[in-house]
Amino acid sequence: MANQTSYGNVKHVVYISTDISDLCNHCNYNIGSDGYRGFQNSINHYINDHGYQLLHVGSETGTDSNGNPFNSTVAVVGK
C-alpha cells in the first residue's frame, strides 16, 4: 500500500519557485537562489529544518517585463 498523506491539517503553505528569491519564513536561509540547485535545497530546507511536507511540484508559465514567455518550476510545501 502506498504512503497516504493527509493535507487536512495543513495550516501554513509556502510557495517556492525557480523564478523567485526570498528568505525562509522562519529563519534567514536564502530561498530560491542559485537556480535549480537552490530550488532543491530550498524544498529540502523547509522539509528537514522546519518539518514541512511537500504538497505539490509543477511548472508555471509567465511573461517577463517585455512580454516574452518563460517557464519556471514551482513547489508548495506545508505544515
Image: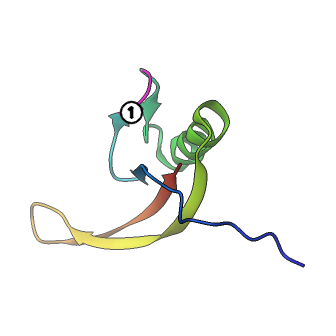
- Read off the residue under disc 1: 25
Q: Seen in the image, is 15 located left or right of residue 45?
A: left
> Which of the 4 quarters of the picture holds residue 67?
bottom left
* Residue 26 is one of the magenta-drawn residues: yes
Q: Nearer the viewer, residue 28 or 71?
A: 28
Residues 74 and 35: in front is: 74
Q: Residue at x 42, y 52 (%)?
A: 13
The residue located at (59%, 40%) in the rendering is 41
Q: Residue furthest top?
A: 28
Tell me which residue sits at (58%, 34%) in the image: 50
Residue 75: x and y, percent?
49, 59
Image location (x, y in percent) of residue 23: 36, 30
Determine the residue located farthest toward the left in the rendered image.
Answer: 66
Determine the image quadrant of residue 72: bottom left
The region drawn magenta spans 23-27
Q: How is the image coloured?
A: rainbow
Q: Nearer the viewer, residue 46 or 3?
A: 3
**Given the image, on which type of amino acid does mark 1 rest?**
Asn
Which quadrant of the view contains residue 62?
A: bottom left
Give the main secondary structure of the magenta stretch. loop
Q: Give yes or no for residue 61 being in the magenta stretch.
A: no
Point out residue 56 in the picture as x, y percentages from the top left corner.
Answer: 53, 66
Relative vertical location of residue 70 with respect to residue 79 in this rendering, above or below:
below
The percent position of residue 44, horizontal first and vertical second, equals 63, 42
Question: Along the horizontal axis of the image, is 60 left or right of 55?
Answer: left
Taking 48 as reference, is 7 above or below it? below
Check disc 1 and report its element: helix, strand or loop.
Answer: loop
